[in-house]
Structures are given as structure tokens and as C-alpha cells.
Amino acid sequence: MNNVKGRLIIQANIALTCVFLLSSFVAAIVFREPFKTIAVVIDLLCFSLGVVVFIWGYFSAVQRSRKDTISVVELYFLVDGVATKKVVLVMNSLLGIQLMGGIGTALMRSSTDGQRGSTLAFGILVPMLGLGLNGLWAAHYGNFSSRGGGSSTQMPPLVAPSGKD
């Protein structure tokens, strides 16, 4: 992945996903303090960072949409040739891993030691990080179709060039 555009975003996604998984699985297996608290803090940091980069990516995409036609699916799931197959595979796999890791660790404990709820449930917030980083990567490095006429005041077509919404 050395010659890939947006390598820093991809590496950050890999590193943060690994930290999330490690802390969540340790907390689910041990289910004692301080591991539960550490997992919650990491989950909330990943979620918060995800919200920030989601907004950053969205703002960048809106600025770019003056010249390019950008759909939400292309932006957040990197489909229709927005990214290379390698980038799509890595980024969407990490999003899937975050989703499955969050749900999986939340369901790992059938009992919460008599207390309501589980600190492991905070893991289901982490996929916001993957969505945000996908959007940030696509907004800055993605290949979108050009609007054509440059600064035209006409409405863009209602159907994306790929025929998908």
C-alpha cells in the first residue's frame, strides 16, 4: 500500500480498527475493570473521530460536487470505480470488521454480572469511523464523473451516470 493515494487515511483506519478490536475482545473475555473502561473510552474516541471525519469528508465532497457528480453510495462505500479495487477491498473490509466486531463483542457476554446493560455495547458505534474515513478518502482522492459544463447553473441529472442511486 506504499504507492496508494490517501495512504495515511488507510493506515489510520487499519491501526484504529486493530486497537478497537484488541480492546473490545480483551474487555469481552476478561470483563473486569479497567479493561471495560478502556474499551468504552476507545469505542467513544473512535466514534467521535468518525463523526469529525464524516463531517470533514462530507464538507469536502460538497465543495468538490461543484465540478463532479458525487453520490452518497460512491462517497461512503467507494463503489462505481471511485477507488481502485485494492482500496475498496481494504476500506470496506475494515468497515465490515468494525461492524462485526462491535456487534460480536456486544453479544459475546450473555450475562452482564447482574447489571443493566453492558459496556461492550459501545462498540456498535465504532463503524461510524469506517464510514467517515471512507468518505474522507473518497472526497479527497476518489474518481468521480465530471459534471460537464463546469460552472453550469443547470440542475444535475436525476439519475447517476452509472444508473445507480
Image: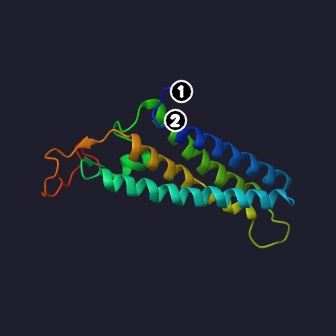
- Please name whichever residue, 125 or 143, is drawn nearer the observer in this view of the structure: 143
Callout 1 crowding tier (Cα within 10 Å): few <14, some 14–19, many ≥20: few
Task: Indicate the secondary structure of the residue bearing disc 1.
Answer: loop
Q: Are marks 1 and 2 in contact (CB under 8 Å)?
A: yes
Residue that badge 1 annotates: 2
- The reply to whether residue 162 is in sight is no
Callout 2 crowding tier (Cα within 10 Å): few <14, some 14–19, many ≥20: some
The residue most toward the bottom is 116
The disc, 1 or 2, on the residue closer to the chain's N-terminal end is 1
Q: Residue visible at 50% across and 35% down?
A: 89
Residue that badge 2 annotates: 7
**What's the coloring here?**
rainbow
Residue 39 relative to residue 113: left or right:
left
- The mark total stands at 2
Q: Residue visible at 67% across and 57% down?
A: 43
Q: Position of residue 27 (x, y in %)?
A: 80, 54
- Could you tell me the amino acid type at mark 1? Asn
Q: Position of residue 146 (x, y in %)?
A: 22, 42
